[in-house]
Image: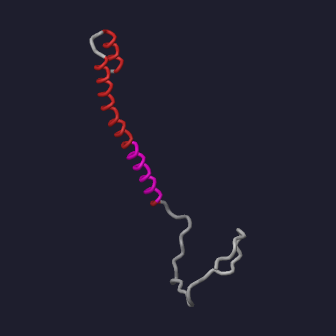
Amino acid sequence: MTVFAARAVVGGTMTVGDLVMVNALLLQLFIPLSFFGIVYRQIKYVLADMDLVFKLLECQLEIADRRRRGRCRPERGPLRARELPLPTGAPDPP
């Protein structure tokens, strides 16, 4: 379209201002179309990822978790980690 407008300018049937107007109209047309293309691609990828997640949820587990017999309840106060050797060589926390 821009090429045709440029040929018309060279031929004398259009002015340079007409060429600028054609270029601006084409930009106003193609920028929203580009945006819709991006949104379409993202939706397509999301749907493909959702399909993979649902397929993973349908798979049988190779190793099943054992059922817990009861909850772990501490018998004495809070647990504290003191005087543990740290492999980083950092001092023990207070």
Residue 11, x across and y down, in percent: 31, 9
The reply to whether the magenta stretch includes residue 45 is: yes
Work out whether 88 lies above or below 41. below
Task: Give the image quarter of residue 27.
Answer: top left
- Image quadrant for the N terminus? top left
Q: Is residue 59 left or right of residue 28?
A: right
Q: Which residues are magenta?
A: 41-56
Q: Is residue 84 left or right of residue 37?
A: right
What is the image's colouring? Answer: secondary structure
- Image quadrant for the C terminus? bottom right
**The furthest residue to the front:** 17
Which residue occupies 61% across, 82% down? 80
**The furthest residue to the bottom:** 76
Task: Give the image quarter of residue 31.
Answer: top left
- Disc count in the image? 0
Work out whether 48 lies above or below 65. above
Q: Nearer the viewer, residue 72 or 24?
A: 24
Residue 89, x across and y down, in percent: 72, 70
Instruction: Name the magenta segment's main secondary structure.
Output: helix
Q: Is residue 86 left or right of residue 55?
A: right
Which residue occupies 71% across, 75% down? 85
The reply to whether the magenta stretch includes residue 92 is: no
Which residue occupies 28% across, 14% down? 14
Q: Nearer the viewer, residue 19 or 39?
A: 19
**The furthest residue to the top:** 11
Q: Nearer the viewer, residue 51 or 87?
A: 87
Residue 3, x across and y down, in percent: 36, 18
